[in-house]
Amino acid sequence: MALTPRAYPLIGYPKAWTPGTNGQVTGEAVLAVISTERDFDTFRGKLRGKFVLGTAMRDVPAHFDAPGHRYTEAELVELSKQPDAGGGRGGRGNFQANQEFAKKKTQFWVDEGVAAVLDISRGDGGTLFVQGGGSRDPKDPPSPAQVVIAVEQYGRIVRTLEKKIPVTLSMKIDNRFDDTDLNAFNIVGELPGSDKADEVVMIGAHFDSWHTGTGATDNAAGSAVMMEAMRLLKVSGVKLRRTVRIGLWGGEEQGLLGSKEYIKAHYADPVTMVLKPEHAKFAGYFNVDNGTGLIRGVYLQGNEAVAPIFQQWMEPFKNLGMNTLTIRNTGGTDHLSYDAVGLPGFQFIQDDTRRTETRSCRASRCRSRSRRPAAARRRSRKKKEPQSAEGSPRKFFSAIAACFAVPSYRREYLSPHARSFSFRSRASACSSIVSTGHGNRYVQFLSLTVAGSLTRSGHPKAS
Ligand SMILES: [Zn+2]
């Protein structure tokens, strides 16, 4: 909290893999933004025991629009078009230089003996986005304590300092590294197929999150949707020809660690591209990791030839707002691990619900995919009651049945890695179910987890 010139509590969270303060620490705040080599000399010898505001204050605009955003029809049309070929970003050399400079700055803070380094992040109005600060590898150089502060309060401290009025802060950060178990895990479960049981369709989502929230919208929401898809496949009693497998990944936030390890163990080494036998039997992977917004379509990952297949299975869900295919790639999540070894892996287009890595990333942010379709289903159930003994929405289940009833057909296409693979229309059935708006049932997700209906497997090191 701030003690002078006026006492007020601060909204602040320590970054992951940064040390604590070793008890209550009180000291002066100082604005010390280091962006050039010369800045090191400016601040050398002046930061001991101080709380360093290491980031220049940014503009905090007034909000006139809601933070969540549903894609408009015009935006979806735009998204479906081939993007202009743009110039590359930054370049490797630039990236490496920035990394080196960041390392030097961290070492400088440690050497100068700062009390803690304060930072701001995306988000405002009390919403903080907090990720890692130091390194999770104990062999790497140490980091000082690092705290993300709400932008408005950070700005208040900066403005006070600019008026030459001293600001005293006091913090007690109880961080510690827990090295008792350095293994992380994936959760893998499957519904075995029948005559083509050795061929596999996978769905998945990442199971890990960051420390400042519960991870409900990133990515328990995605995990719950995929578990619900598995449950529906099971209770519908539909006879699966191929095996449907779910992967809930660990360590996604640290660089897709869990899914990368799984791919390496089962399908191919992305470095040598030596393929394992399971690679040839793989149909497709579908991933959900964009929060709790309505699903609006699919990113094709540059794979034009797969478009007609998705087009066909999106058909029953058009009136739920899912009708867009884009040739564009989307990155940042576990389908990339499949894509990297030439396996078809896809992520959905979803409405933006301002979801990730925030301290408000909690179950209260989760939404049913859409209240309207849910209501429509309720209505449909009422109408169909006499024909539906279990009271399940008929149309919904007949849609699932349709996905599995169509004759299996194969389509050869080229992946971005210029390899030829087959893709089956049925592979997408699970994802069709996911996209119907069956909601994020967080409670159900928890109960399934507790019931241990899925097995642990794969132990990627995430130390
Ligand atoms: Zn995520």
Image (spheres, helix red, strand yellow):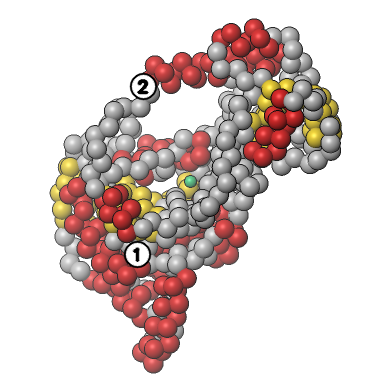
The answer to whether the residue labelled 1 contacts the one labelled 2, judged by CB atoms less than 8 Å apart, is: no
Residue nearest the observer in this picture, 232 or 22: 22
- Is 13 drawn above or below residue 422 in the view shown? above
Does the numbered disc 2 mark a residue whose Cβ is under 8 Å from ligand 1? no
How many residues crowd around disc 2 within 10 Å: few (fewer than 14), some, or many (20 or more)? Answer: few
Identify the residue at horizontal 73%, vertical 9% (top origin).
Answer: 45
User: On the picture, is 373 further left or further right than 27?
Assistant: left
Q: Is residue 376 above or below residue 345?
A: below
Mark before the other along the chain sequence, 1 or 2: 2
Residue under numbered circle 1: 321
Q: Nearer the viewer, residue 131 or 272?
A: 131
The residue where tag 2 is placed is: 91
> Is 215 or 454 nearer to us in this picture?
215
Question: Where residue 14 appears, x then y in whole percent?
Answer: 68, 35
Asked whether the viewer can see residue 92, the reply is: yes
Amino acid residing under circle 1: Gly
For marks 1 and 2, give the CA distance: 38 Å
* Mark 1 surroundings: few (<14), some (14-19) or many (≥20) residues within 10 A: some
Q: On the rendered structure, is 371 left or right of 116?
A: left
Instruction: Residue 367: give x, y in percent of width and height.
Output: 52, 63
